[in-house]
Image (tube, helix red, strand yellow):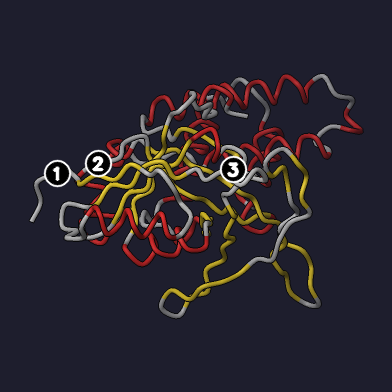
Amino acid sequence: MLVKRSFKPQKKQLVYHYCSAETFHAICTNKTLRFSDLFSMNDFLEIHWGYHIWEKAANKIYDEVTKEFLDKVDEIVSGSGLNFNFLASCLSLEGDVLSQWRAYADDGNGYCIGFDAKHISGLPTRQLKVLYDEKKQVDEVCDILKKIYEIEKKEPEDIRYGKEFFEICALLSADLTSFKNPAFKEEKEIRLIHILNFEKSNEFLKLVDRGGTYFGKEYDGQEVKFRMEKNLPIAYIDFNFVNPAGENPIKEVILGPKNDSRITAIAVYLETLNLPNVKISKSIASYR
């Protein structure tokens, strides 16, 4: 949908994941990247910010489209939480940023993992560059809405707002999750999004992974798991990042500014776990 912001990595480009020592260990031993419910992310406006932008865009083009059209889009966008569950894994284009060490790597005691970006693009995800400029966010959604409107206007009334309309608005809902408050612009985030569906189960609903393309081949989906955050269950899926050829995408590891581990100890650790030839360095950020 938001083609301009689709992340298309260059050859040998790295994307970085800041994490605690415990998460670093889990990633290296399990060789997986976790995708968690967006509602559980650090910024409590993760979902609400995108809807706020959708509302501003709808108001801006109100006189250029019909009220019926905007109402139909809103039914899907505002109701996306009843149809879909968005999981995300958050990466960055920068590997040694003090604010990220503080926020995401145990206050500088953790690690930053540099993944081969082209390799990671083989996971079943929608990969977008996060946009932080509010005006550009609104303009982008306006442009999308106008294009959807022109498509629907050409459809006969009896088939208007059908399956294809639902699917394109569902993608819009997913893409809204890659808008963030300008206060986070230093993160230079690349957001990998995976969509789960809600499916009727007895008198309630359950989450289902309906699959996708995994390293170029279709897969049928996998079990949705949960972790507890305080007293709240958080949905997640761990995707194995080793491709069918057995290649490892971890190319670099940076130790946080408060991390006292020896580089040689981490090198032995990674080689023993069959994660070879990883460049290891210490953060140059001054933080104590």
Circles 2 and 1: CB distance less than 8 Å? yes
Residue carrying label 1: 285
Q: Quadrant of residue 107?
A: bottom left
- What amino acid type should be assigned to the residue bearing mark 1? Ala
Q: Position of residue 252 (x, y in %)?
A: 36, 42
Name above or below for residue 230 compared with residue 239.
below
Observer-nearest of 177 and 244: 244
In the image: residue 117, left or right of residue 73: left
Name above or below for residue 188 compared with residue 228.
above
Residue carrying label 3: 174
On residue 8, the disc is none
Mark 2 or 3: the one toward you: 2
Name above or below for residue 132 compared with residue 50.
above
* Quarter occupied by the C terminus: bottom left
Q: Quadrant of residue 102?
A: bottom left
The residue shown at (66%, 33%) is 67
Q: Mark 1 falls on what kind of element?
A: loop
- What amino acid type should be assigned to the residue bearing mark 3? Ala
Observer-nearest of 109 and 71: 109
